[in-house]
Image: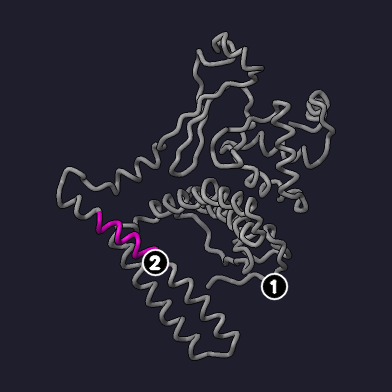
Amino acid sequence: MSIEPLKDLFAKSGLKFTNQRYLVYTVMRKARDHPSAEMIWQRVRDEAPAISLDTVYRTLAAFETRGLVMRVPGDGEGGRFDGNTTPHHHLICFVCGSIEDFSMSGVGLADLPPTVAAWGQVRDVQIIGRGICRQCLACMESTQPDVHNQRSTMMSKTMENLQEAFAGESQANRKYLAFAAQAEKEGHIGVAKLFKAAAAAETVHAHTHLRNMKGIGSTAENLKAAIAGETHEFTKMYPGMIETAKAEGDKTAERGFTFANAVEELHANLYSKAAEDIAGYPDKDWYVCSVCGYTVAGAAPDKCPVCQALAKAFFKVD
């Protein structure tokens, strides 16, 4: 939507036209993934780096009360938002957090029983269907053991053990690398090398467990799994963690969760782009922000768009 019609729309809704409201509304109208406030904030920052998350929250609240956007209820503490305000309903996957629209006749304001009028003024009626989407079902079916077979049932416990061992070894690897960096800072080079050697061994263990779980497929399958994992994190996992950190007043954790949430969405988009043309995906150098993990190809930016760190905070991935 161009600026002039949007100015008229805002005026009719009792809103002053501002560039920030324009950007938030434009992002919402284009979005098809029912983004959260945090997701919208990250997208708007491409055009307005100085905009705050609080401004996005307040803008969305103003839009919602005026019927310019719809909140999808019940998905996390902050909810998700829909720029399509025509009557429709939603299906939510509680595995990956994806949301899809659907229409259904015979369910609307006009179909409510007369007794509802005694409650007050109903402005919107939505059906929320919760379950497991077809993509997640396919993933689950490909790894689901035969519960009717005793041997498969026995193996399911082994699968749980493999998953636990993989998680433990993976965490140990990252922890020991962090310990090695600290030892280097303190001048204990021999201990640092020991930590690095142990971290490499934990990687061997983790990869072994992952292979035994049949967790490594073709590149196309691996990209699909990576997209699902990153999408779950930025749509489902981190938004709830951010809200909890806010409620508990833990600013440091909130900052870390917010940075990670933004980068996981970026990773999902990068993986999706790669999945579109695996054979033709270009061979480029990649750079990562050492503060927030922002990932970019070609060259490090002058300033990180997520955490605002300068170019010197980026390192090239070997």
Q: CA distance from mark 2 to mark 1?
A: 33 Å
Which region is colored magenta? 157-170
Q: Main secondary structure of the magenta part?
A: helix
| Residue at the left extreme, as displayed | 150
Is 199 included in the stretch rendered in magenta?
no
Q: Is residue 201 above or below residue 151?
A: below
**Which residue is under mark 1?**
312
User: Can residue 161 be found in the magenta stretch?
Assistant: yes
Q: Is residue 59 left or right of residue 94?
A: right
Residue at left offset 78%, top offset 30%? 6
Label 2 SS = helix
Circle 2 packing at 10 Å, graded few (<14), some (14-19), many (20+), is: some
Which residue is at the front of the view, 175 or 228?
175
Instruction: Name the residue that disc number 2 marks.
Output: 168
Colour scheme of the rendered structure: one colour
Image x and y of residue 86, in percent: 62, 22
Q: SS at mark 1?
A: helix
Does 127 sit left or right of 41 as displayed? left
* Residue 299: % across, % down: 65, 66
Mark seen at residue 162:
none
Q: Do the numbered discs 2 and 1 sit on residues whose CB atoms are within 8 Å? A: no
Image check: 178 left or right of 223?
right
Residue type, numbered disc 1: Lys
Query: Mark 2 or mark 1: which is in front?
Result: 2
Pick whichever of labels 2 and 1 is earlier in the sequence.
2
Identified by mark 2, the residue type is: Gly
Which residue sits at x=67%, y=59%?
251
- In the image, residue 305 sits, relative to residue 178, either above or below, namely above
Dividing the image into 4 quarters, which one contains the N terminus?
Answer: top right
Expressed as whole percent of the image width and height from the top left, the position of residue 90 reads: 51, 29
Relative to 193, say whether 230 is above or below.
above
Furthest residue in direction front, as rendered: 118
